[in-house]
């Protein structure tokens, strides 16, 4: 049985004051015990969120880490070991905003994924196709290639402690959600690709769906066989919505 996971990607949002309000509001929510939860604040707020959520069931992650796991001359980057030192156990890698806006390659994503695991963090590997790629019928090929490059760098064994998130780029922040059937098809293909290397690991890995998930559409997505939870952007900035999505994952 895969434990449902709901992750909140706060992206480049928030001030110390608004983050304090969000922590406070999350504290008022009822969360199901069966669901694992993690939020990914901006790097500058990680310490504040780690302290603020210390008594809650919600873990804290970072939105990115350096490809070098330890100390290095790498101006502006934050390493996985530094994140662990401030109480952060999770990290997003390969989010499409980093791949497409910041030019992060498949290879760089694979190195970051490996660096996170080397520091005992849980990486959430984000995969997804653009609208043009979907319209050209290339979805499975694109997602398959993104996954294969991480497998080549980090190996199948690394998926024992990793999470995958399928996030079609056209569904992110657009209000357009993949239908449960569209998402399920890709989730099943991701699991199938992993099972070619190791069926037991493939059966255990959690695959989240991300892209305009809200309280309103969460339950039907989470009902699909290979969808094990969600990676939530916009809706995770509202405690009520995040709480409702977590409760949908628990049902
Ligand atoms: P969204 O973002 O829920 O606002 O579409 C999801 C993500 O980018 O992780």
Image (cartoon, grey):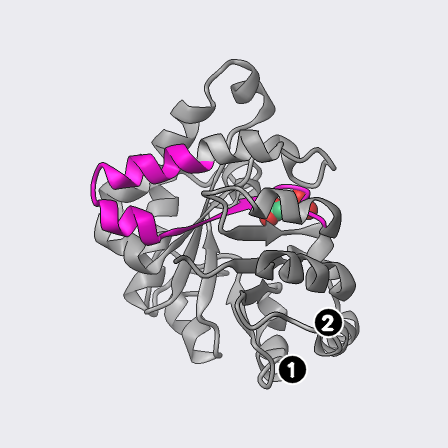
Q: Residue drawn 35% across and 30% down?
A: 145
Taking 196 as reference, is 136 above or below it? Answer: above
Mark positioned earlier in the residue sequence (1 or 2):
2
Quadrant housing residue 198: top left
Secondary structure found at label 1 = helix
Quickly name the residue at label 2: 19
Q: Residue drawn 38% across and 37% down?
A: 190
Q: Is residue 212 visible?
A: yes
Quickly name the residue at label 1: 52
Taking 110 as reference, is 31 above or below it? Answer: below
- What separation in Å lies between label 1 and label 2 (alpha carbons)? 9 Å
Residue closest to the eye, 230 or 101: 230
Q: Residues within 10 Å of mark 1 (few under 14, many from 20)?
A: some
Q: Is residue 10 visible?
A: no
Q: Which residues are magenta?
A: 187-214
Q: In the rendering, at what x and y percent does residue 8 appear? A: 61, 59
Q: In the rendering, at what x and y percent does residue 149 appear? A: 30, 37
């Amino acid at each position: 049985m895969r434990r449902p996971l709901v992750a909140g990607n706060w992206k480049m949002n928030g001030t110390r004051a608004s983050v304090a309000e969000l922590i406070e509001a999350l504290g008022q929510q009822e969360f199901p015990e069966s669901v694992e939860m993690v939020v990914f604040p901006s790097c500058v707020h990680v310490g504040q969120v780690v302290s603020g959520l210390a008594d809650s069931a919600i873990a804290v992650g970072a939105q990115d880490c350096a490809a070098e796991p330890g100390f290095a001359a790498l101006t502006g980057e934050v390493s996985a070991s530094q994140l662990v030192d401030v109480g952060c156990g999770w990290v997003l890698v390969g989010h499409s905003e980093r791949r497409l806006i910041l030019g992060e390659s498949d290879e760089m994503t694979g190195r970051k994924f490996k660096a996170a695991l080397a520091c005992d963090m849980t990486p959430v590997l984000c995969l997804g196709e653009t609208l043009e790629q979907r319209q050209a019928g290339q979805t499975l090929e694109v997602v398959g290639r993104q996954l294969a490059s991480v497998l080549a760098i980090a190996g199948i064994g690394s998926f024992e402690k990793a999470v995958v998130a399928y996030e079609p780029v056209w569904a992110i922040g657009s209000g357009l959600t993949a239908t449960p059937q569209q998402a399920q098809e890709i989730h099943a293909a991701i699991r199938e690709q992993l099972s070619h290397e190791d069926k037991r690991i493939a059966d255990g890995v959690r695959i989240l769906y991300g892209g305009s998930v809200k309280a309103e559409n969460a339950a039907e997505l989470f009902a699909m066989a290979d969808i094990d939870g969600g990676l939530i952007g916009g809706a995770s900035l509202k405690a009520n919505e995040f709480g409702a999505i977590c409760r949908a994952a628990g049902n």
